Image (cartoon, rainbow, N blue to C red):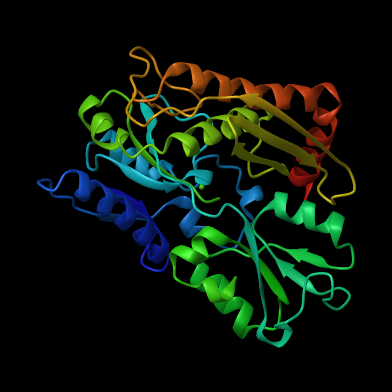
Amino acid sequence: MSGNGDAAATALARIQTDTVVAMLKALYPGLQFEIIAMSTTGDKILDTALSKIGEKSLFTKELEHALERNEVDLVVHSLKDLPTVLPPGFTIGAICKRENPCDAVVFHPKFVGKTLETLPERSVVGTSSLRRAAQLKRKFPHLEFKSIRGNLNTRLRKLDELQEFSAIILATAGLQRMGWQNRVGQGALGVEVRAKDQDILDLVGVLHDPETLLRCIAERAFLRHLEGGCSVPVAVHTTMKDGQLYLTGGVWSLDGSDSMQETMQATIHVPAQHEDGPEDDPQLVGITARNIPRGPQLAAENLGISVARLLLNKGAKNILDVARQLNDAH
């Protein structure tokens, strides 16, 4: 088993991997699990914004090579790091129950008690995400936004020790997993395995959380249809209530001045975890869930595609094309 991250970036990756191992040990007390820490391209290139690197598998390629060589049998990722189209031979064999998917604002000590709205004019806010920057530029035009890279420890140290940033934006789930709630894949962990390794698929498949799985299928279908990645500001959010899956998707210009959002819903039955699922070619948006019925999975995928198509029909492609061109030019 592998979790991504070098010696400096391992803390969160190790916590996430340990979480999955603990769940597997509880289910399979007779099995032994060896954890191997590995570095990825995304861990090593820290002086360039993610949107500028141009590599779709920043946090996965080296780990997938280890899977391919049978050096490891499964890899734990933040699901947001996994592209919506995986390389041939790989699949997401488990999606664990999602934690808080929200973003968190962490302020420099001298601005504790402030909000983004009350920060001084031209205060600098750090984020590695074009999506976060575009959304916040639209709402807080008096602020400036700058890329900040590194693991959580590094970003918090840059915030606290340097005078460059007034605040930074981080994922709440990561802060909570590190035990830093007092400072507050967005929330979900995915386990990547070899697509044809049925023994490992059966081993990890029991970790699927049905509601999180269906929400993530819808979200990834939306992102895949829009070709959303690190180079464009695209966002998606889902909720499940009373048998209805609600999906809100949006696109933004880089400066946040132009945006489009749409919400749709679908009636989806959240199945019991171990109902019979599809037997042949079960992958949807890179996810294999043989113990979840096909019907709800397809309904979730269709919801994501439908919202993406609606946005495209209303002109979202123009916003995304301009965002890509501007991002490539800078």
- In the displayed image of the protein, which residue is found farthest to the bottom? 110
- Position above or below: 162 against 144: below
Name the residue located 41 percent from the left edge and 20 percent from the top edge: 293
Which quadrant of the structure image shows residue 259?
top right
Q: Residue at x 61, y 31 (%)?
A: 245
Residue 158 point in image, percent of width and height: 60, 77
The answer to whether any part of residue 151 appears in the image is no
Image quarter for residue 116? bottom right
In-image side of 102 versus 43 (left or right) = right
Q: Residue reaching furthest front? A: 242
Of the pair 44 and 204, the residue shown nearer to us: 204
The relative height of residue 25 versus residue 155 in the rendered view (above or below) is above
Q: Is residue 298 left or right of residue 256?
A: left
Q: Which x, y percent locates residue 275?
A: 34, 23
Residue 108's place in the image compared with 3, above or below, is below
Q: Is residue 193 left or right of residue 146?
A: left
Q: Residue at x 84, y 68 (%)?
A: 143
Residue 152 visible at all:
yes
For residue 32, side relative to residue 220 (left or right): left
**Image location of residue 254, percent across then percent down:** 81, 48
Location of residue 318 by image quarter? top right
Viewer-side residue, 4 vs 135: 135
